[in-house]
Every structure is written in C-alpha cells, then in structure tokens.
Amino acid sequence: MRWSFALSSVLLILTIALLSPAVGGEGVNVLEVQEGYEKIDEATESITFTWVAYNNDTSPYLLEIMGTLGPNTNGKLPSNVELDVTQNYSSFQPGTSREIVVVLSSSQAVESMDFPIYVNMTFTKMNDPDQVLVVSKSAMVHVEALFESTGNKIFGIWDNNFPSPFNTLIWSFIFTIVFWLAIAAVIYFVVDPLIHVFTKKTKTDLDDRILEVTRTPIFLLIIIFGLVDSLSIINIPQEWHVNIILLYQVLLILVISYVAYLIFDRVIIYYAQKLSKVTDTEIDDVLVPLLHKAGLILIPVFALGAVLSLFGVDLTLLVAGFGIIGIVIAFAVQETLSNVFAGTQLLLDRPFKVGDIVELDSGEICEVKKIGLRSTTMYNTADHEVIVVPNNDVVNKKVINYSRPDKRRSLNAEIGVAYGTDLNKVKEVLLKIASDHPDIIKEDGQMPYVRLAKFGESSVDFKLWYWVEIRKMWRVASEVRQAIYDRFMAEGIEIPFPQKVVTLKDDKKRP
C-alpha cells in the first residue's frame, strides 16, 4: 500500500513537471493523489488525505493549511474526532513540489456518523505578498462506532418473541444476563464437580490442584463477560461503553493475575518444594523460597504495569526509572550482593554441605548447620556457640573440610624417648596401644602404624598414626595420649625432659 502510494505521488510530480512551463507560469498547481475521498473507517483508527502541490512559478511561495470538520447529516458537528495537519506552514521554492497530508482520527467513544472535512490551502507569493492563491478541497467521511447496539435480541442473536411486557429491549438485556448466570452456575456446580470425579482417579494431584485454583476465577470471568456482552443489547452512550470496557479489562487483568499467583503458589512452588526435599543438593532448598518471594513481588508488578498501560501510562519511563533506582540500590547493598553471589557459588560448587565438620581460617572447628544466600551458619563444637559467617569470607578464605573424602580422619601422637631406649619395644608398645583402643579403625589401608620421626636434641621422637571417626577424634586423641603415658611408665620407658649441657670454660690461669 505504501509503495503504491509513493509510486503514484512520484508519477504525479513527474506529470506536473512535464506539463508545467520552463519559465513563468500559472503559479501553483494542486493535484489529488487518489480518486474518491469518501472513507469508511472504524473507531480508534485513522484516515489520511493527501494532495501534491507544485510550484511552477519563478518565485517561492508560503503555504498555509487549515482543516475543519463539517456538520453531520443532523447538522451537528462531530465529537471525539480530530483533524490534524502534519505541517501548517511551509515554504517551497520554484520548481519543487510539496505533499499536503491531513490525518483524521477518532477515539473509542465516537458515534457512527457521516460528515465532511474541508481543507483550505493558502499560497502567498513571498516576493509579492499581495498575490494570494486559495485552493479548497473537501472529502466525505463515514465513521463506524466501536460499539453498536444489536437491537432487541437475546444474546444479540435471537429475536425477543416473548409476550408483552417481556418483549422489550430491557427485558432482552435481563434475559441475556440471567442466561449467562445460568451458564456460570452450571459450570461451577455441575461441570466442575463432574470433572473432579475423574481427576481424583488419576495418579497425580496436579490436575486436582489446577482445577481447584481455577474454579472460582472461571466462574467470575463468565459472569463479568456476560455482563459486558449484554451491554451490546441496550443503547447506552459510547462514553459509558468505553468506561465499562476499560473496567472490564482491569478486572480481567486482576483475575488473570490472581489465577497466575494461585498456580504459581499452589502448584509450581508446591512441586518445587517436594522436589527439593528428595534431592541431594542444597541449592534448591534456598532458591525455592527465594523464587516464592520473587513471585509474590513480580506477579503484582506485572499486573500493575498492565493496568497502567490501559490508562495510557508510558511504561518505558517507569522501567527506566526503576533501572536507575536499581543501580542506586545495588551500590547501597554492594556488600550484601557480594555475599549473595558468594552464597550462590557455595551452593553450586558445594565445597561442604550441611552436617560437615570444617575448620575455618581462624582455626575454629565447626559443624555446618545452614548454607544461606547471604551467610553460612555453623556450630562451634568446642565452645558450644553458633557462628554466622558471611559467605564472602567463606569463599575467599581457606576452609578445611574434615568430612571429606569420608567421615574418618588420620591423627598422630608424637612422643619422645630417651637415647638408649629399646626402639623396637617402643614401636611394639605404641602399636599395642592403638590395637587395644576400640574406636581406632583397623582396616586394610587404614591400619595404625609407627614411624621414627627424628632424632631430637634430648630424645628420639616417634609418631603413632591412626584413623578414627571424625566425631570421636578429640576424645580418642586424648585417650591415646593418656594410654601412651601410662604404658610407658609401666614399661619403664623414659620420656626425657628437654636437656641442654652447658660447659663453662675458665680462661684464667691459676697461680
């Protein structure tokens, strides 16, 4: 359509240029782009009228355009209609052309009518203002209203043939509303329970939950739609109809948003929580509540945005404003966001999980109780206190996980004996201590063993290595050290004190 319009405009301009004299002439020519200006349009749409003016004179002209609406067939000026001229004032030089475009638009509240439009084009020679050329154009327009009464028909389809006084327009309106209420009641009290009988027999309760959350909203939507649809029977002012439709659209958005929230809360979140309980990862245990809270915010926000768009509010500015506010908030809570991203990294990398025993960079040995998005909660087993560590510190500092690769830990007891002691006997006594302790693990690959560690300044140092369950390691380590001391005392094995021999040298000569 646009290509054909542009082509016709070019052809008209070329025609005028060929027919016009090379020097001097009749001033300005105005030609019509298309034949027939009577238009049939629907409300809320627009009509464009176009003419082409060509200056075949040797002087420039100033063009002034003025458009007016004429009365309809009843002698009344049309309302809710606007006539807009794209460029009221313009000038064009000799040998050039200019498009004259007038746009007729109507609002939703316009009534069906026929009326003319008038466009006056005043051309004033710029080097001789007394020479003025006025060209008038007109066109007939027919506009169809957006809402038209269907007349005395039930549902707008069947003629009302009831006996008097029930055969009037208002009774057709009442009958239609009653029928819509009956349809909604049948679906709510008959169809829905009947469907529920079949859904109970299925293995999953998904269909039961969806049916439960949509039952009442569907009932309300049918009633609201029936009321609005029945308005097409009676002849009410277009402004009323527009406002009622606007209210209907608002209610429709609210009901749909409510249904979306119920499905999100009672179906999606419900199954997400069930799934998170059977998975090994903790990330879903944290993200599901976060997703739930986000849904409580986002669904009403989208509903509010949809309602505002109905009233012509430009959401682009609102989104840009929220974006700037979001940047400001991000700077204000930078530390919190850093901990949130660190918490997400912990949940994804899983260096430890709830129940693991870890040693922090500060030396505290704790049991992991909870991994949150902002912080990690730990229980200090030695001091009986709860420690809350920001996730950023956990991620960026050294953490030793005692619970990996398994629930066992290798410990050692270091002991020194005096020089001259029977070293083989020392080994036998240490291995005997380890083998007699019930909580020390004695399995292939994790058997206790003894090594001669080093020759110290005052003792020969041995190390006894053994494996034990993590939760028993502090008690077992203490008991092993106690047993070593007792057995060494019983066996007469000396545990020497650190000794240093100091020799004093006297350089003075005696008489």
Image (cartoon, grey):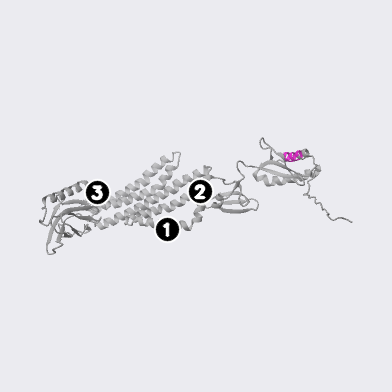
Q: Tell me the amino acid under the disc marked 3.
A: Gly
Total count of labels: 3
Please provide the residue range marked out in magenta: 427-436
| Element on which disc 3 rests | loop
Residue carrying label 1 = 325
Q: Which residue is mark 2?
A: 344
Disc 2, disc 3: CB below 8 Å?
A: no
Q: Is residue 491 magenta?
A: no
Q: Nearer the viewer, residue 130 or 8?
A: 130
Q: Looking at the picture, which amino acid does disc 1 mark?
A: Ile
Left or right: residue 379 compared with residue 457: left
Distance between the Cα atoms at labels 2 and 3?
59 Å
Secondary structure state at the residue bearing disc 1: helix
Q: Position of residue 256 (x, y in %)?
A: 37, 50
Q: Earlier in the sequence, mark 2 or mark 3?
A: 3
Q: Earlier in the sequence, mark 1 or mark 3?
A: 3
| Label 1 to label 2: alpha-carbon separation | 24 Å
In screen coordinates, is 355 left or right of 78? right
Question: Which residue is nearer to you in this view: 131 or 213?
Answer: 131
Viewer-nearest of discs 2 and 3? 2
Q: Main secondary structure of the magenta part?
A: helix
Residue at the disc numbered 3: 156
Q: Is residue 395 above or below residue 85?
A: above
